Amino acid sequence: MFKKIMKGGHRKPSKSEANEPSSYGIGLPDNRSGPGSNVVVSHASRGALVNSSPSPVTATPPPPPMGSVEVLPLFRDVPVSERQTLFLRKLQNCCFLFDFTDTIKNARDKEIKRQTLLELVDFIQSGSSKVSESCQEEMIKMISVNIFRSLPPASHENTGQEPADPEEEEPYLEPSWPHLQLVYELLLRYVVSTDTDTKVAKRYIDHSFVLKLLDLFDSEDPREREYLKTILHRIYGKFMVHRPFIRKAINNIFYRFIYETERHSGIGELLEILGSIINGFALPMKEEHKLFLIRVLIPLHKPKPIVVYHQQLSYCIVQFVEKDYKLADTVIRGLLKYWPVTNCAKENLFLGELEEVLEATQPVEFQRCMVPLFQQIGRCLTSSHFQVAERALFLWNNEHIVGLIAQNRSVILPIIYPALEKNIQSHWNQAVHGLTTNIKKMFMEMDPELFEECQRQYEEKQLKSKEVEEQRQYTWKRLAEAAAERDGGGGEEDHMITS
């Protein structure tokens, strides 16, 4: 995942950007083969780029004025000298928005606009004629008119009900997608084209444009978020001047999500972009990036909808530990801080992520956090939810983790031995019982003397606990007898007074 690296801008990075990666990748195809190279956005609607049909919407944009959309000749049918003018006229044709609540209304004009957008995409992709600066400006204006809009309210906002489980919700599909997809495709082709001069393009793809793109990540349509992810990633790679601003703007979205709303549709896509950025961080890592880990990524374990974006979050976290092994202690303690108490599904996610982090953890960092870590693992081992107990026991299937445990068995075994005994004596699930027995045998073979000492200490504690419990029961019995005697005497005295 995220192994391909995308080429950055064409200029040499400045000294201030020396620690920034020169290239980033999220599995996107390289653009070195020329302006006609293919850029693929992987979603289900990609194959329906041409043959898309309109569908109803909730919001109604104003219809275009009568006669505003005209049929224009194809680019190949006009001389090269007139193509820039024709390009501008086609852009003007595409600036009109349509009402998609009725598929029949303005059907002819909608089809003209769709065909015009297809021509514009092909024109930019082919690189047959370099687009002038004024045409580039008008093209970004046309793109802005089409994609920057108020997003419809989420389904729970319409009904006033509590938000449902994000995994169970039906995805919202943008009704104007037959046009919107082609506009996004045009923007993507423009950004990745080798003919696009970064110095010129950054005048139009500026901070304001980037912020509006980021706002659209809250779209509920997964197809739109997929395009946005690809486009923003390409902008980050090509426009080096925007990199610090993009990171800061994404941080602000995360802060609001964590501490205010806990509701945002594009957290997974934004983390996917950041995963490839983190992959390219140079060493030694900047303090800014470490603060991002502590203040943003670790607190992202707190929100309830973590199941939606946990895979991308876990990838980002592991990337940090693989880049700088000294961060393992910080990450593990952060996971323990936000460890779920009553959410078993979330606890399983944490155990899976913990295993990935431990695989990248060195012995020195492991020793710094092993006591609180295995206190928590011990609680997971005895969980009444069999999946949590099983997932915790599966940690012993990992050779690297077993090696770390073996090196520090004198500290770890006394912590978890009571949990192992409790499982064998009283856990209801047979699979958990069997796995626990195997782990006990592993420790017994690893260090018989230590195992016997832990067993002896456990038996002594159990005996003491039994004695304490018996003494407690005896004390309560004496108190109950004394109270009964006093109640009996008090009752006689009260009878004498009343008589």
Image (cartoon, rainbow, N blue to C red):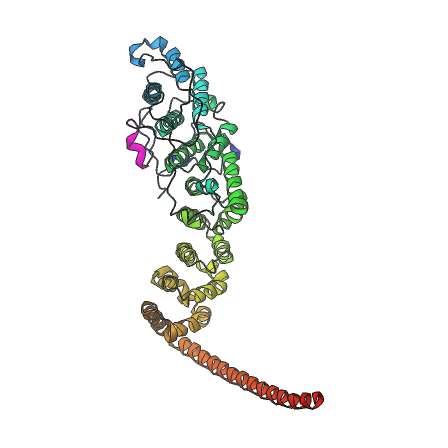
- In the displayed structure image, the side of residue 440 where residue 369 appears, left or right: right
Choose between 368 and 127: the one closer to the eye. Answer: 127
* Residue 51 highlighted magenta (yes or no): yes
Q: Which residues are magenta?
A: 41-56
Residue 155 seen anywhere in this rendered image of the structure: yes
- Residue 490: x %, y % from top left: 66, 88
| Residue nearer the viewer, 52 or 89 | 52
Q: Position of residue 158 (x, y in %)?
A: 46, 40
Q: In the rendered view of the protein, which quadrant contains the C terminus?
A: bottom right
Q: Which residue is painted at 41% across and 40% down in the image?
A: 269
Q: Position of residue 295 (x, y in %)?
A: 54, 47
Q: Position of residue 35 (x, y in %)?
A: 33, 24
| Residue found 42% across the figure and 72% down from its top | 417
Which quadrant of the structure image shows residue 175? top left
Is residue 246 one of those drawn in magenta? no
In the current view of this chain or complex, which residue is farthest to the right?
497
- Who's the residue at 42% across and 32% down the image? 58
Q: Name above or below for residue 56 compared with residue 79.
A: below
**Looking at the figure, which quarter contains the N terminus?**
top left
Q: Total of numbered circles in the picture?
A: 0
